[in-house]
Image: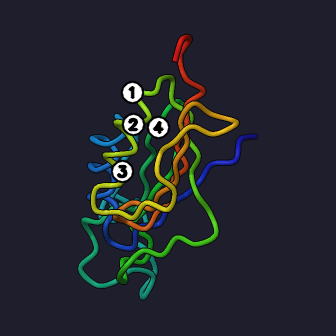
Amino acid sequence: MPVQPYLFFDGRCEEALEFYKKALGAEVTTLMRFEDAPVPPPPGAVAPGSENKVMHAELRVAGTTLLASDGSCNGKPVFQGMSLAVTLPSVADVERAFAALADGGRVQMPLGKTFFAERFGMLTDRFGVGWMLLTEGEPGQ
């Protein structure tokens, strides 16, 4: 059984999904809003007025399914103690994705050649999600 990261954006999930579609070419395969649930959330489980927020979403990124939600919709998302590692097929792909994810985020380690990858870098995107991007490179690079 696979382990799937489940990201809670605390009210910014739809914005994050759109960002990842542009930045990483992610494909949203499932999206369900709180108002679409067959049983409404119990009182106090989500902030009032959150009916149109994302209860559950699935998106494909580089061949992996990530799960996402607005969670309780109570404020700023917090992601600590984890990063999502993505290996991309080429230097051009990793440079493009890194630049896109860094827009509005914070770079911890700029992209560069390492002993284990043609390009590797670490950043936190505008939503606070940590990313490690790398490519083993292409022949001749």
Tell whether label 3 touches label 1 (CB within 8 Å).
no
- Gap between marks 4 and 1, in whole Å? 17 Å
* Left or right of residue 19, residue 74 in this image: right
Q: Residues within 10 Å of mark 2 (few under 14, many from 20)?
A: some
Q: Mark 2 points at which residue?
A: 95
Q: Where is residue 17 in the image (x, y as percent from the top left)?
A: 33, 51
Hey, what amino acid is under mark 2? Answer: Glu
Q: Earlier along the polypeptide chain: callout 4 or callout 1?
A: 4
Q: Earlier along the polypeptide chain: callout 3 or callout 2?
A: 2
Q: In this view, does 11 lie above or below 104?
A: below
Question: Going 52% across and 48% down the picture, which residue do you hit?
Answer: 121
Tell whether label 2 touches label 3 (CB within 8 Å).
no
Taking depth in this image into account, of 76 and 104 the one nearest to the observer is: 104
Hey, what amino acid is under mark 4? Answer: Val
Question: Going 26% across and 58% down the picture, which residue do you hit?
Answer: 15
Taking depth in this image into account, of 8 and 124 the one nearest to the observer is: 124
- Gap between marks 4 and 3, in whole Å? 13 Å
- Gap between marks 1 and 3, in whole Å? 14 Å
The answer to which quarter of the image holds residue 41 is bottom left
- Gap between marks 3 and 2, in whole Å? 10 Å
Q: Where is residue 37 in the image (x, y as percent from the top left)?
A: 39, 60
* Left or right of residue 52, residue 4 in this image: right
- Gap between marks 2 and 4, in whole Å? 16 Å
Hey, what amino acid is under mark 1? Answer: Ala
In terms of secondary structure, where does tag 1 sit? Answer: helix
Tell whether label 2 touches label 1 (CB within 8 Å).
yes
Q: Name the residue under label 3.
A: 101
Q: Mark 4 points at which residue?
A: 61
Q: Mark 1 points at which residue?
A: 92
